[in-house]
C-alpha cells in the first residue's frame, strides 16, 4: 500500500518545533500499517527537518542557539541578501540539517525511540506556513 498526502503547518517563529503529533494526525492510514516506512519531506529551502530529543524544551532552545552561532546572520561575505538578513543563513542551516526523514512504521504508529520526536526547524524569523509531503508505504 502506498499513500501520499500534504500537511500544511501554520507559521511558526524561528526555532525547533515538535511536529510528530501533527504528522501522525494527518495520516489516519497509519493505523492500518503493520510494517512500513514514512517519508517526510519539507518543500522549502529555508526550513528543515530533524529527529531528536522530544522531552526537554531546553534541547530545542539549545539547537536554535547552536545553529544561530554556527551560521550567523551578520556575515560580511553573503551575496544572497535580497530577501533579508535571515534568508541566506536559513538556506545554509537547511542544507546542514536536510529536507527529509525516513521513519519506520510498526503496528500502526511511527516507531520512534522513547525520547525521539520530529522537529520542524524554522530558520527564518517569519517563514510562513510550511508544506510537508508525507509518503506512507507499507502493509
Image (cartoon, helix red, strand yellow):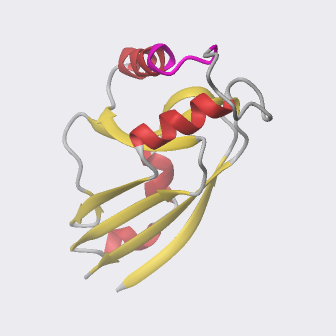
- Location of residue 91 in the rendering, given as x and y in whole percent from the top left corner: 57, 39
Picture quarter with the C terminus: bottom left
Magenta residues span: 68-74
In this view, 61 is above or below 12: above
**Left or right side of 129 for 27:** left
In this view, 90 is above or below 72: below
In this view, 113 is above or below 44: above
- Location of residue 131 in the rendering, given as x and y in whole percent from the top left corner: 62, 56
Picture quarter with the N terminus: bottom left
**Left or right side of 58 for 131:** right
Location of residue 58 (image quadrant): top left
Instruction: Work out whether residue 121 can be spotted.
Output: no
In this view, 62 is above or below 12: above
Identify the residue shown where x is 61% and y is 51%. 44
**Left or right side of 100 for 86:** right
Identify the residue shown where x is 63% and y is 33%. 88
Instruction: Work out whether residue 133 can be spotted.
Output: yes
| Total numbered labels placed on residues in the image | 0
- Location of residue 111 in the rendering, given as x and y in whole percent from the top left corner: 23, 55
Location of residue 105 (image quadrant): bottom left
Q: Is residue 72 magenta?
A: yes
Identify the residue shown where x is 42% and y is 47%. 98
Identify the residue shown where x is 39% and y is 83%. 2
Q: Nearer the viewer, residue 46 or 19?
A: 46
Residue, far right: 82
Amino acid at each position: 500500500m502506498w499513500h501520499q498526502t500534504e500537511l500544511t503547518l501554520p507559521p511558526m517563529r524561528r526555532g525547533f518545533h515538535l511536529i510528530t503529533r501533527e504528522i501522525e494526525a494527518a495520516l489516519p492510514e497509519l493505523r492500518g500499517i503493520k510494517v512500513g516506512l514514512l517519508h517526510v519531506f519539507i518543500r522549502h529551502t529555508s526550513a528543515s527537518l530533524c529527529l531528536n530529543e522530544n522531552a526537554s524544551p531546553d534541547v530545542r532552545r539549545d539547537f536554535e542557539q547552536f545553529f544561530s552561532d554556527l551560521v550567523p546572520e551578520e556575515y560580511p561575505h553573503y551575496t544572497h541578501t535580497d530577501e533579508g538578513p535571515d534568508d541566506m543563513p536559513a538556506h545554509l542551516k537547511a542544507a546542514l540539517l536536510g529536507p527529509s526523514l525516513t521513519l519506520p512504521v510498526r503496528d500502526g504508529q511511527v516507531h520512534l525511540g522513547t525520547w525521539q520526536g520530529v522537529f520542524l526547524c524554522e530558520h527564518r524569523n517569519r517563514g510562513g506556513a510550511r508544506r510537508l509531503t508525507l509518503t506512507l508505504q507499507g502493509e
